[in-house]
Amino acid sequence: MTDIRRRPGDGTGGLRQGTTTFESLREQAVTLRREGLSRRQIRDHLAVHNNDLLNRLLEGEQPPEWTKRPNAKDDLRTKARELRLQGMTYDQIQLELGCSKSSISLWVRDLPKVDHRSAAEQGRDAAVKRWAHEGPIREAARETAISAARDAVGALTERELLLVGAALYWAEGSKSKTYRRSETVIFINSDPGVIAVYLAWLELMEIPRSRLQFRVMIHESADVAGAEQYWADAVGVDRTALQRTTLKKHNPKTVRKNTGTDYRGCLIVRVSASCDLYRRIEGTWCGIVGSAGSTK
């Protein structure tokens, strides 16, 4: 065999060419590698004791399987992947196998992430996500429908307002009972729009403002002064003209949702000397009920 010596600066890794060239030596090394020999066996067979040269001779060639060192953690890795696919967290896998979380992370990082939310939480989050998409669409459809219905109403005739006001009072106003006769017109509501329609109806019924008494009813924990001013402005009177506000006691066991700056309680509108008005309301309502089945 050709004598192999190192020569500094040589592109072949220090091989001085003789009767055996680098190419022919590489061909022999590759052949031996593909026959299943280890690096040590190839080195001894070819008498190449320079690691740099041996690396170049075997460049690109994979070692045979039998030369690969078995990894002591292969079984742990397999088990960790199985547990991850079952839905376990890193902490649970670590407790089960006794290995570090950094190793677990490396072993299972290509697997889908585990969803740790409960079924209820997943359903709630899905609903929130769906509503984020559908909410604006539904809101636009809602506004369109409301706008069309509002425009279809047009101007009210006196007869229409008469019927609307009587029905509104019978739904929201105080009513006399057979066991407690009290024909006093008292109306209460928290919607300023409802109050505005009711006041327009009272004007149609020729009830002067001098016969109206206004009083706010609200929870004691709310902004009482702000609510009083709001309702005074809504009905067009000075705040000092309001009767003494009725404060509702707060029950700490009750979770109230009517809180915040938009909560202004209710306004009570009382008509003095209203027995005759009450009877007109009741009669109008009875007429509405009696005619409901005979619409044309």
Image (tube, rainbow, N blue to C red):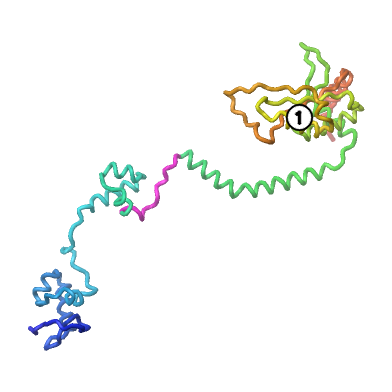
Q: Please state, as top left, top right, bottom left or bottom right, where the N terminus lies in the image.
A: bottom left
Q: Nearer the viewer, residue 236 or 188?
A: 236
The secondary structure that most of the magenta stretch takes on is: loop
Q: Nearer the viewer, residue 99 or 164?
A: 99
Res. 24 in view: no
- Above or below, comparing residue 98 to residue 281 in the picture: below
Q: Quadrant of residue 30?
A: bottom left
Q: Nearer the viewer, residue 146 or 233?
A: 233
Identified by mark 1, the residue type is Glu
Position of 242 with respect to 224 (left or right) is right
Q: Please state, as top left, top right, bottom left or bottom right, where the C terminus lies in the image.
A: top right
Q: Position of residue 212 (x, y in %)?
A: 86, 24
Position of 142 with respect to 61 (left or right) is right
Residue bearing mark 1 = 228
The question of residue 16 being in magenta is answered with no
- Above or below, comparing residue 60 to residue 243 in the picture: below
Q: Position of residue 281 (x, y in %)?
A: 85, 23
Q: Residues within 10 Å of mark 1 (few under 14, many from 20)?
A: many
Res. 291 in view: yes
The residue shown at (63%, 31%) is 257
Position of 226 with respect to 75 (left or right) is right
Helix, strand or loop for disc 1:
helix
Q: Which residues are magenta?
A: 107-118
Q: Quadrant of residue 230?
A: top right
Q: Residue furthest top?
A: 179
Report the number of discs.
1
Q: Position of residue 87 (x, y in %)?
A: 36, 45
Q: Residue furthest bottom?
A: 19
The residue shown at (48%, 40%) is 121
